[in-house]
Amino acid sequence: MSNLPASLPEWLALLETRHSKEIDMGLERVASVKKRLGLQFSCPVIMVGGTNGKGSTCAMLEAVYLQAGYRVGLYSKPHFLDFNERARINGENVDDASLIKAFTAVENARESTSLTYFEFTTLAICQLLAEAPLDVVILEVGLGGRLDAVNVIDADVAIVTSVDIDHTDYLGDTREKIGFEKAGIFRPGKAAICSDPVPPQSLIDHANAIGADLWLFGRDFNYAGDKQQWNFGGRTQRRNSLGYPSLRGANQLLNASGVLAALEVLRNELPVGAQEVRTGLVMVELPGRFQVMPGRPAVVLDVAHNPHAAATLSQNLDNMGFHAYTYAVFGSMLDKDIDGVIAQLKDKVDHWYVTGLPLPRAATAAQLKQKLLDAAGVLSDPEKTIVAFESPEAAYAEAISKAGENDRIVVFGSFLTVAGAMRARRTALH
């Protein structure tokens, strides 16, 4: 093939324009290109799906296995600032040259098959990880599970973190329908772990119907803890006196329990000691998940974009201690349950800075402002305000200029909202 892009930005620009639909559910096209690529893994693969908690679960798995001295590959998404964040080997982002080589391999194998941006980049990153000398690969599912491009790979262990209402246009509008889609990553005879304490019956039924080895929270694995430490109990393995994960938040012990269940499943191939688990959980880092930045005013970055995640964010804000005023920088996609998100957080915020985002399917600042005005109680207090901005960078800059050092700024909603604030911070530092 001649005339292929020479740089990563040129490749990404090409892929963004190529396929008519941004999301095109179905695996036939991806599977055909995967076969031509000869894509297969020679080490255990852990696949992580779910509504919320996927990123945290992947980050903990990566951190613990790295502490244990294993060579670890990770595919996660979306990215905040650089596409390379999506592909990591041994804790480091993959360089442009490696990605370009993998993109070229997929381009040569795809022949006349049309692939979406997500399908193409998923195949390329999986190919890159399959060719690297690795001991374990962790793959984060994008949307749903059953028809997600990542699901052309057969995982040795599949984890579903939580099942809640999101992406209803594609996955259905009930937890039962969505649970069936998420359970699509399970495989016959392989471990299928669900760390949601109240899993939909559809997920259980599908796992049983295909003969997966289903691990349910509360039945096959569990945790107990006090303020200082916590304990994990699996089917045959106990881990005691564990430190809390460095990721803050109410659901992190559920996520960590799913991680330890996966370690138990793979204990013969990839043994991990107690100290390595402790250190890994304490050292794990994940941008944009209740990430409290250093300095004052307090700045919290959180990609909460559905009611389930917003409820967790609300709980975490309550645990932060006193702040005189809370400023929110909020941007969202239009297809999200924006009213449900606002309902969880309206009592926690004094000043709303709503923003548009650089995508056609994003809500405009005016639409968000109207939803806040419609939400009972948001403006009933004369001290409260709602201001609209064109971009997250502009909204964040205004919040920084207005907030006092005893206040806090919460940037939340879409990944693009948090990425905008991260960009503004990075610019301010240079």
Image (spheres, rainbow, N blue to C red):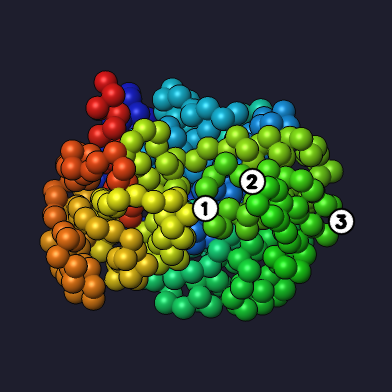
**Residue depicted at 82% across the width and 52% down the height:** 238
Say which residue label 2 marks. Answer: 244
Q: Amino acid at mark 2?
A: Tyr
SS at mark 2?
loop
SS at mark 3?
loop
SS at mark 1?
loop
Residue 249, labelled with which disc? 1
Q: Amino acid at mark 3?
A: Thr
Distance Cα–Cα, label 1 vs label 2: 10 Å
Image position, residue 268 (x, y; %):
84, 43
Q: Nearer the viewer, residue 340 or 93?
A: 340
Q: Earlier in the sequence, mark 3 or mark 1?
A: 3
Distance Cα–Cα, label 2 vs label 3: 22 Å
For the question of whether residue 220 can be seen, the reply is yes
Q: Earlier in the sequence, mark 2 or mark 3?
A: 3
Image position, residue 341 (x, y; %):
34, 66
Distance Cα–Cα, label 3 vs label 1: 28 Å
